[in-house]
């Protein structure tokens, strides 16, 4: 089938929509590996999490614990989405459109192949928006397709605590994106930062601020949180932490 002018199909492990039954599939690969000499104390503290001496293969016990925590976080996020008000979400969409001149809804990604730009993916069922930008080397079309086809690594599903981790945009599937808005602002990074502020954190699917190290440093200096979390155990209040 076609979605926004792009051919999409079910993969061997994931369908075209996010479903709990396909979430948190166990992979024993450690995607956050680091050499022992870099953080020797942390290496020793984590030794029981692995079944090999080089810390590249996660243990069965760790994987089962992590999967249970990831599914608990999944359920908390779903409950959070249910609590969000539809009218307030649509107001946030309207606010978003007023923030960046030229931000336009598109129905076909074809013209945005190898085109630099700012993009907003809207997930209406979940009342969420994801803001991103990309250069011409990849282009908006390829970047959005990458979100649709990628899967967040099993050991990275949690971003912080069970009660605070936001579901990664790469955990959602192609058909979860129901609207796409694009623009070609002069400064994509600054426009992204403005959109993130305008949308409101309860409707924002981003886990972190994007942008160059210079912009991230500026955001931190201004007091903006660089890592976004949610208080999922307490009516979904948005929190910010300074992290990277």
Image: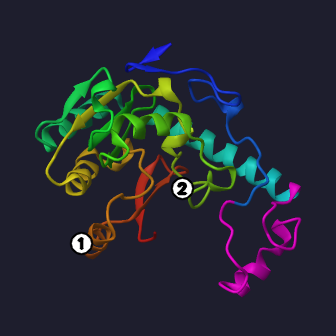
Which residue carries the number 2 mark?
164
**Residue under the image location 15 percent in, 44 percent down:** 99
Which quadrant holds residue 128?
A: top left
Identify the disc placed on residue 222. 1
Q: CA distance from mark 2 to mark 1?
A: 23 Å
Q: Position of residue 206 (x, y in %)?
A: 41, 49
Q: Nearer the viewer, residue 114 or 167?
A: 114
In the figure, is residue 164 to the left or right of 227?
Answer: right
Q: Is residue 32 magenta?
A: yes
Q: Residue at x 67, y 37 (%)?
A: 23
Labels 2, 1: front one:
1
Determine the residue located farthest toward the left in the rendered image: 101
Q: Is residue 123 above or below residue 188?
A: above
Instruction: In the rendered structure, find residue 130 and report the number of the disc placed on it.
Output: none
Sequence-wise, which precedes: disc 2 or disc 1?
2
The residue at 65%/29% (across/down) is 14
Mark 2 surroundings within 10 Å by alpha-carbon count, few (fewer than 14), some (14 through 19), many (20 or more): many
SS majority, magenta: loop
Q: Residue 104: where, in percent of width, then height? A: 19, 30
Tell me, yes or no, whether the highlighted magenta stretch contains residue 190.
no
**187 or 72: nearer the eye?**
187
Element class at badge 1 = loop
The residue most toward the top is 1
Q: Position of residue 61 (x, y in %)?
A: 87, 57
Q: Which region is colored magenta?
A: 31-60
Instruction: Please tell me in which quadrant of the rendered image residue 122 appears.
Output: top left
State left or right for residue 167 relative to residue 113: right
**Near-viewer residue (230 or 101):** 101
Measuring 22% from the left and 47% from the top, which residue is drawn there? 198
């Amino acid at each position: 089938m076609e979605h926004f002018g792009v051919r999409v199909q079910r993969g061997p492990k994931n369908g075209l929509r996010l479903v709990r039954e396909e979430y948190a599939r166990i992979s024993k690969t450690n995607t956050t590996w680091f050499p022992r000499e870099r953080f020797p104390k942390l290496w020793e503290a984590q030794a029981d999490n692995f079944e090999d001496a080089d810390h590249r293969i996660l243990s069965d016990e760790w994987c089962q614990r992590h999967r249970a925590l990831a599914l608990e976080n999944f359920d908390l996020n779903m409950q959070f989405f249910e609590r969000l008000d539809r009218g307030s979400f649509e107001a946030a969409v309207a606010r978003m459109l007023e923030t960046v001149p030229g931000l336009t809804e598109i129905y076909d990604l074809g013209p945005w192949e190898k085109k630099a730009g700012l993009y907003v993916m809207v997930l209406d069922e979940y009342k969420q928006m994801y803001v991103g930008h990309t250069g011409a080397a990849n282009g908006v079309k390829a970047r959005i397709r990458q979100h649709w086809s990628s899967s967040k690594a099993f050991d990275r599903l949690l971003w912080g605590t069970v009660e605070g981790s936001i579901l990664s945009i790469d955990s959602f599937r192609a058909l979860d994106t129901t609207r796409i808005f694009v623009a070609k602002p002069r400064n994509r990074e600054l426009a992204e930062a403005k959109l993130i502020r305008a949308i409101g954190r309860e409707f924002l699917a981003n886990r972190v601020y994007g942008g160059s190290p210079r912009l991230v440093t500026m955001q931190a200096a201004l007091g903006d949180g660089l890592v976004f979390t949610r208080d999922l155990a307490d009516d979904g209040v948005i929190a910010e932490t300074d992290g990277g």
